[in-house]
Image (spheres, rainbow, N blue to C red):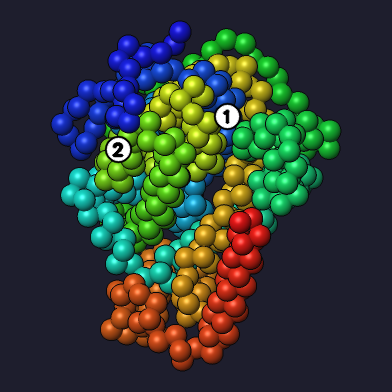
Amino acid sequence: MFGPIYKRKEGEVQPGINLHIFKFVLRLPFIHYRFEWPDYVQGLLLCAVCLGIIPVLQEYLGMPFEIAITIVIMNGFLYCWHAHLGDPVVPGWITPAIPLLLLWISSFPNDTAERMHALIAFEFELGVVTLFLGATGLAKKVVDMVPDALKAGILIGAGIAAVRLVFNAGGSFDKYPWTIAIAIGFAFYLSFSNHFKTIMRKNKVFQVISDLGLLPAMLLAVVIAPLVGELPWPTIEWGFTHPQFYELFTQWSPFADRIGFPPLQYYISAFPLVVAVYVVLFGELIQADALIDEAREFRNGDENIHFDANRNNCIVGIRNIIMSMLGPDLSMCGPLWAAMQVVICERYKHGRDAMDSLIGGVASFRLGTFTGYWISPIVSFVKPILPIALALTMLIQGYVAVRVGVLRAKTFNDLGVAGVIGGVLVSRGAAYALAVGIVLCLLVYGKNFFKRRLDLYNLKSDPLFNIAAEKELAQAQEQAGASSTAAKDVK
């Protein structure tokens, strides 16, 4: 019923219009891909997560709610560009980097013009760098040159900064302790608990709950917050959202008389943070590539679909440049919403009947979130608990960023250097952290600063590493032996 006009033959690329620039391929719903209603409906509900940036815009930049939601709507429109230009991902915020940006923004006086100058300069510069690296194909080469210790330190620092954002004196936890404690406990249980994973595999209801990401925890917060007296019950408003585009452009963009374009020193000051954020951003590109490769293998080659990091970089760069000029946004324009990419890829694995094309799934989801921003009952229902939504996002992101950062370290030296970089990042910002990280890496690794192979780090001189390596080798051999025995028994 909702199938596309141009149907894909088995094993081929989904039909589309080649735009002959940056590998963009235009695809439209009902014409080039099947509209996936399950993903669209899920997007309608989960638009609430995207609204969580509104209280941050209000607190750090002094924006009214109406201006903040206008920025969310603009960003939501740009989210839809990815799938419709050939990029099979669910784009989102650069979530691990938000605490780093907030730390940097906070270093400027609490003056709207100064902080807007800082944000405009940073987001524009990030967009230009990302677009340049994507258009030239240099993205992977540049990031490969960054030592693992430096990558790990940035991720660990970002994770700690995210947790600190919630637990700072006078922060969200001090204002809403019971709601955050209960909601985050529930969210962590659904997301990371081995017990829940066990029962989820046996019960389809629990699988659906798991697929909804942070939404169940947010719905719990809507009930808990009023019961403990920390936030009011939602007041449902009917109708549609009324964005204030004219007010945004004339009062809150660089074209506004009271804001103007940033002086050169803001761009110079933003550069170390741009480097740190790009390292985080590239980590998300690697994650997207892995998720799509895994999902494609489950479909036995019925769709020829691949992730192109350079194309993704080009779209991300263009989005950041546009937002910096028309609606500067503290969430930034990122390449991936990892949690939802996982959910949609899992449904894609169920076969062509479940989801004809991955492009259709991710496009329908983002069209759903974009629709949700305009529906007042949805926006007004979650409006009271938006600070809780942000706290949940930051704490989950903090957990994941630290875990990924530690795994990024390949040796104990990497981990030690990363810990120092992370501490400096949280206490003194990205510029100091990058400087300290480069000096430490030069001192520890010397001429092998840019080399990637483990044997170049002289691991034999590290007895702790040898002990750990021997244990891992023994465990691997034991598991291999057990697998071999089991295989013989089967035969």
Q: Nearer the viewer, residue 473 or 42?
A: 473
Q: Residue at x 64, y 55 (%)?
A: 490
Residue at the disc numbered 1: 46
Task: Give left or right: position of 313 versus 62.
Answer: left
| SS state under label 1 | helix
Q: What's the residue type where badge 1 is placed?
A: Leu
- Residue 407 in sight here: yes
Give the residue furthest to the front: 491
- Residue 264 in sight here: no
Q: Residue at x 39, y 52 (%)?
A: 286
Q: What's the residue type where badge 2 is placed?
A: Ile
Label ID, residue 315:
2
Sequence-wise, which precedes: disc 1 or disc 2? 1
Q: Nearer the viewer, residue 374 or 118?
A: 374
Q: Residue at x 70, y 46 (%)?
A: 197
Determine which quarter of the picture holds residue 468.
bottom right
Q: Residue 371: percent from the left, percent from the top?
A: 49, 19
In the rendered view, tell whether residue 183 sits above or below residue 412: above
In the rendered view, tell whether residue 239 sits above or below residue 332: above
Q: Residue 396: percent from the left, percent from the top?
A: 61, 49
In the rendered view, tell whether residue 61 sits above or below residue 275: above
Q: Nearer the viewer, residue 89 or 432?
A: 89
Task: Give left or right: position of 167 versus 457.
Answer: right
Task: Give left or right: position of 134 versus 122.
Answer: left
Q: What is the quadrant of the C terminus in the image? A: bottom right
